Image (cartoon, rainbow, N blue to C red):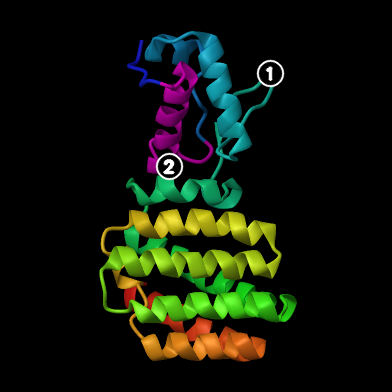
Amino acid sequence: MPVVPPNRRVSDVVHDRLRASILEGTLAPGDAVPSERVLAVDLKVNRHAVREALKRLEQAGLIRITHGGPTRVQDWRDHGGMDLLLDLVSGGTVVPAEVVRSVLEVRQLIGVDAARRCVAAVGPDERERIAGLAEDVAAVVGKPVDLVTERYEKLWHAVVAGSGNLAYRLMLNSLVDAVAAFPGVREAVVPADADRLRELAAAVREGDAETVAAIVDAQLGRDVDALG
């Protein structure tokens, strides 16, 4: 029986082991996953725990369960979702640079579109609040990373919420966690240009969505170029 940490189920441990094997390539796309009986014996767990773990892997797009045939591994690049980001950044056979660049490119694309949508959608009072948040970030540029990051994330949560796109909000949560998980990346993407942030605040106040988008594109694109 595997060691099960507090507040976790046996099926969670089985799920994590199988998922790691898939992401690391030990179980490659097209490979047959061992049967429930074999997994239960090898992992010293009951078949119910194995069945639950396999259902979760299927829901995540990592395997395809076929009744009457073998359960096979699917290519996570074609079938996985944003929830895999944190698994990828934790290690494995995926080249870190590839993952870093992918995360930062998605961050840029979402950021630009969300900023444009937000400024076009919200009213003057909300634009004033968001402009104030941008100025709050500008005020602490050059100070400890944790302080700048806290204010910067608060700004982005307001911008993405203002865009009215729920998928963007959920993706932002994953992207923030993914960027934070890369050693050195969190510090490198902290904004360092206070004047540019003040320009962003001014454009938000004026409701100039295209200027806002251009400023955001330049800022987040710099991060891609620097670390990609």
User: In which image quadrant can residue 123 be found?
Assistant: bottom right
User: In which image quadrant can residue 128 be found?
Assistant: bottom right
Frontmost residue, 189 versus 61: 189
Kindly identify the residue that appears in the image at 59 percent across and 54 percent down: 170
Disc 2 is placed on an element classified as helix
Disc 1 is placed on an element classified as loop
Rendered position, 28 above or below 67: below
User: In which image quadrant can residue 165 be found?
Assistant: bottom right
Q: Which mark is residue 23?
A: 2
Tell me if I can see residue 102 in this picture. no
Rendered position, 5 above or below 143: above
Kindly identify the residue that appears in the image at 56 percent across and 11 percent down: 48
Kindly identify the residue that appears in the image at 63 percent across and 64 percent down: 161
Q: Which mark is residue 106?
A: none
User: Which range of residues does the magenta coloring cover?
Assistant: 7-30
Q: Of the two numbered discs 2 and 1 on the same chain, state the one appearing first in sequence.
A: 2
Q: Hey, what amino acid is under mark 1?
A: Gly
Quarter of the picture holding the N terminus = top left
Tell me if I can see residue 144 in this picture. yes
Q: Which mark is residue 68?
A: 1
Q: Hey, what amino acid is under mark 2?
A: Leu
Nearer to us: label 2 or label 1: 2
Q: Position of residue 164 (x, y in %)?
A: 71, 65
Kindly identify the residue that appears in the image at 39 percent across and 81 percent down: 138
Would you call the spot at circle 2 few (<14 residues within 10 Å), some (14-19), or many (20 or more)?
many
Frontmost residue, 224 versus 176: 176
Quarter of the picture holding the C terminus = bottom left
Q: Position of residue 124 (x, y in %)?
A: 69, 81
Q: Position of residue 131 (x, y in %)?
A: 55, 80
Q: Is residue 43 left or right of residue 113?
A: left
